[in-house]
Image: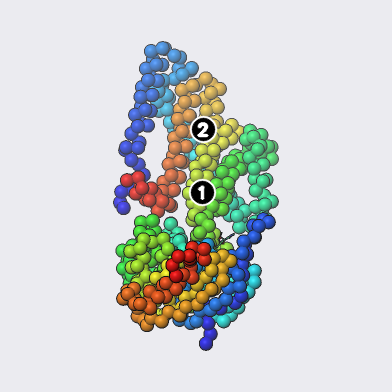
Amino acid sequence: MTHALDVVGVSKTFASGRTSKAVLDDVSFHVKEGEFVSLIGPSGSGKSTLFHLIGGLEKANAGEIRIGSRRIAPLERGLISYMPQHASLLPWLSVAGNIEMALEIAGIDRMEARQSARQWLARIGLERDADSYPHALSGGMQQRVSFLRALLSPQPLMCLDEPFGSLDALTRQHMQTWLLSLWEEDRRSVLFITHSIEEALLLSDRILVLSTAPAKVIREIMVPFPRPRGEQLWSDPVFNELKREIYSLLTPAESKGGHS
Amino acid sequence: MGNRRWFSLRKAGPPVVVLASLIVIWQAAVRLMGVEEYILPSPLDIAREFVSVAPRLFEHASATLGITLLGFAAGSAAGLLLAALLHLVPWVKAGFYPLLVLTQNVPVFVLINLFVIWFGFGMLPRLLLLMLVCFFPVAVAMLTGLTQADPKLVNYMKMIGATKGQLFWRLELPGSISYLFSGLKIAASYSVISAIYAESTADKGLGKFIQLASNGWQTSRVFVGIVTIIAISLLLFGLITAAERMMIRWRVRSEEEAGR
Ligand SMILES: Nc1ncnc2c1ncn2[C@@H]1O[C@H](COP(=O)(O)OP(=O)(O)O)[C@@H](O)[C@H]1O
Ligand SMILES: [Mg+2]
């Protein structure tokens, strides 16, 4: 079976002047087709940098990246559908216009882009905001638009960088179940960055835990819950056990004294 | 949404009142102190003169307006193209940006004399002078705008595979429209002044009109010329502001909302 993504022995060091900072150290993992994989790690550990390597924004110092089993050239772009950490909507384009633009850059024909933007905005209940400018939308709605933009892009692999990181807890929970329901319909391959343990457990098939920078994959956790999933998971004892396990992996060694 | 107004009474009120009072004081002072008309004409003298020279004035004013608009449009277009070129081709920027400043260091009166020597007394030397005066503020403002694109948005566009051209047309150019307009406003006021100045070499135009009136001690007529110049400047400025509001409605509206 071919993988949607292979990351093999990738290292990245940022050099600025005479100092250099190692951010990724020999990172290897893969995402199977139709699999939802989460990367969880402390902030500053190099998760976004990893995305920038996969997306061709930066060059890795070592290792190779294969997308759909083809090895990508350094700085080769446009092979993933991407949702950035901040909504990154162009302020002078309407909500529909932003979606259309992303689709056109991905090579979709203009008429088709327009149609699918309208159709999907209606489907997620945003048809009345299609012609609003982004600043008129709440943070949660902007993230929905940003997600829709990635969802409608034609590339098989979706890379989502902390999509709900800036939202309040309640909106965040709504967005998680919303994303879950959309994703469970057609099961794209997803690589998902988060720093929320519950979020990773709720959404993923597999969780990769990263260490602090320079980041390494320190643990791989299969998430056993059947789909479709819902909020009933919160009370599942296995859920809480896994949560504790990941939590202890993410807790720095020096603060681990008293409790075990 | 329908309450977009080019002109608001509340904003226009105070300057109109101040201006009207000044005119009244001026009229009273000239009358009471018995100042000679050739030293300082009263507003009524100026108005009377205006009516009597109206047909001839109109001819001169339209000559000035014509060359100003032509020079402004051609110069601004040149500035815009140059900024785009400097932005898109890095070695051109490195080579030419410092030289750009040189074009502004030669005094206007030297330039117009040189141009007349080279190109004769036709319209060409005046047009060239106006272009030279207008292209610089537009080019500099535009170049600043093009390099100030939000790095988050630039990263996003690159990650989804935007080409250099797409980055320019979809992000950098629309993002620098407000810079463009501040350049255009400066260029517009330069262009009127320079057109008047250059018309000392012409046989028609407000510059010539004022020069002749001034030589003949017809001070009222000089003031008529000045008032007309101010009117032309305001007209140009108003047109640019209206165009700006139309082009960046997304911004205007967000400011209105913030102000409420
Ligand atoms: N372009 C860059 N130049 C220099 N250092 C960078 C650059 N991008 C990221 N870094 C550094 O790499 C580290 C990891 O950043 P990032 O990948 O954004 O972390 P995360 O997304 O896991 O929070 C940070 O310490 C950051 O300062
Ligand atoms: Mg990050």
SS assignment at label 2: helix
Along the horizontal axis of the image, is B208 left or right of A17? Answer: left
Q: Is residue B75 visible?
A: no
Which percent across, then down, holds residue A15?
64, 60
**Which residue sits at x=58%, y=54%?**
B84
Kindly identify which numbered label has been placed on residue B251.
Answer: none
> Is residue A232 or residue B229 the one in the foreground?
A232
**Which residue sits at x=52%, y=28%?**
B210
**Which residue sits at x=69%, y=40%?**
B118
Which percent across, then down, holds residue B45?
41, 21
SS assignment at label 1: helix
Q: Which residue is mark 1?
A: B180
User: Which quarter of the figure has residue B51?
Assistant: top left
Instruction: Determine whether A169 is above or below A235 in the image.
Output: above
User: What is the chain identity of the residue bearing mark 2?
Assistant: B
- Amino acid type, label 2: Leu
Dot 1 alpha-carbon crowd within 10 angstroms: few under 14, some 14 to 19, many 20 or more: many
**Which residue sits at x=35%, y=45%?**
B259
Q: Which residue is mark 2?
A: B206
Which percent across, then down, holds residue A159?
48, 71
Colour approach in the figure: rainbow
Q: Separation of disc 2 and disc 1 at Cα?
A: 28 Å
> Is residue A159 or residue A129 the one in the foreground?
A159
Asked if labels 2 and 1 share a chain, the reply is yes
Along the horizontal axis of the image, is A95 left or right of A11? Answer: left
User: What is the chain identity of the residue bearing mark 1?
Assistant: B
> Is residue A182 or residue B126 the one in the foreground?
A182
Q: Is residue B151 visible?
A: yes
> Is residue A168 or residue A137 the one in the foreground?
A168
